[in-house]
Amino acid sequence: METVYMSFANQKGGVGKTTFTSAFASFIHYQTKLNVLVVDADFPQHSLLANRQRDTERVNADAYLKQLAISQYRVTNKKAYPILKATPETAIQVAKNYLSKNNNFHIVLFDLPGTVQSDGVLFTLSSLDFVFIPLIADRIVLESSLAFATTLDKTFRQNENLRLKDIYLFWNQVDGREKSDLYSIYEGVVKELNLVFLKNYVVDTKRFRKEIISERKQIFRSTLFSSSRRFLRDSNLEELILEITKIVLS
C-alpha cells in the first residue's frame, strides 16, 4: 500500500492536535501491525520530541515502566516509532528523505504549528492525503476552525492537481452528560458547507489533559506506550481512532 500522509490540524491552539497526533500514533503503532512515522514540524517548540525525551527519561528511571516497555516489545516486536524534527517548510521533504531509506511505514503523521501564518504550513497541508480537524464547543474556536476547514476544502481538496483527498471534522472535549444546542447548530453549518463530521467524538475527561504518565499502571498520553484500555474506553478515543484508520486505509 502507498504510505498515507495525514495530520490533525487547526489554526487555533488548544484544541488537541498534538495530543491526538501522539495518541493516534501510539495506538496504531503499538496495538496494530501498522508502522507509524511522525514528523514534528511544530516549530519552534517541537512538543512531541520534548514528550519523547520526557517519556524516555521516566522509563529509564522507573523499574515498572522499564519492565512494561520490555513486555511491550516482546509482544509487538516493535521499537518506538520515529519522531523526526522539521520545520513546516521542510516537513514533506524530511519525510520523503526518511522513507526513501525506510519504506516500511504505512502512515506518516505531521504535527504542525497552530497557525496558517507560519511559513510552509499551507504547503504541507496541501501535500497530505487527509486532514482531521478537532473542534471544541467554543464559538470563537468554531468560527475560526470552520474558516480554516473551508479554506482547505476550496483551495486544496477541490484542486485535482494537489494530493489532499479529504477533510474531516470531529468534536473534542464533549461533555458526556449532555450536548448543547451549539453542537447541533454547527453540525448543520458544516453540512451546508459540504464538510464531513466523524461519527465518533472524544468525551471530556480531565485525564486527557494530564502529562504523559500520571499514575502508575494508568497511561493517558505517551509516545512510548498506547493509552491504557480504561482510558481508551472512557474517553471514546479508541472508537474515534478506529474510525479514522478505516478512512485513511480504505
Image: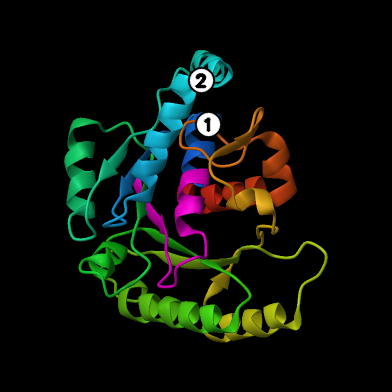
Q: Quadrant of residue 130?
A: bottom left
Q: Label 1's element? A: loop
Q: Amino acid at mark 2?
A: Ala
Residue 104 drawn above or below residue 147? above
Q: Is residue 107 left or right of residue 224?
A: left
Give the label on residue 69, or none.
2
For residue 225, the mark is: 1
The quadrant of the rendering that contains the N terminus is top left
Q: First in sequence, mark 2 or 1: give its number.
A: 2
Rendered residue at 43%/68% (across/down): 10
Instruction: Please give the range of residues in magenta.
Output: 1-23
Mark 2 in CB contact with mark 1 (< 8 angstroms): yes
Residue 75 x/y as whole percent: 54, 16
Residue 210: which disc? none
Residue type, label 1? Phe
Q: Secondary structure at mark 2?
A: helix
Q: Position of residue 212 (x, y in %)?
A: 53, 40
Q: Can the viewer see residue 135 in this picture?
A: yes
Pick the front one: 133 or 52: 52
Please name the residue shown 77% across and 72% down the image.
179
Q: Is residue 246 left or right of residue 93?
A: right
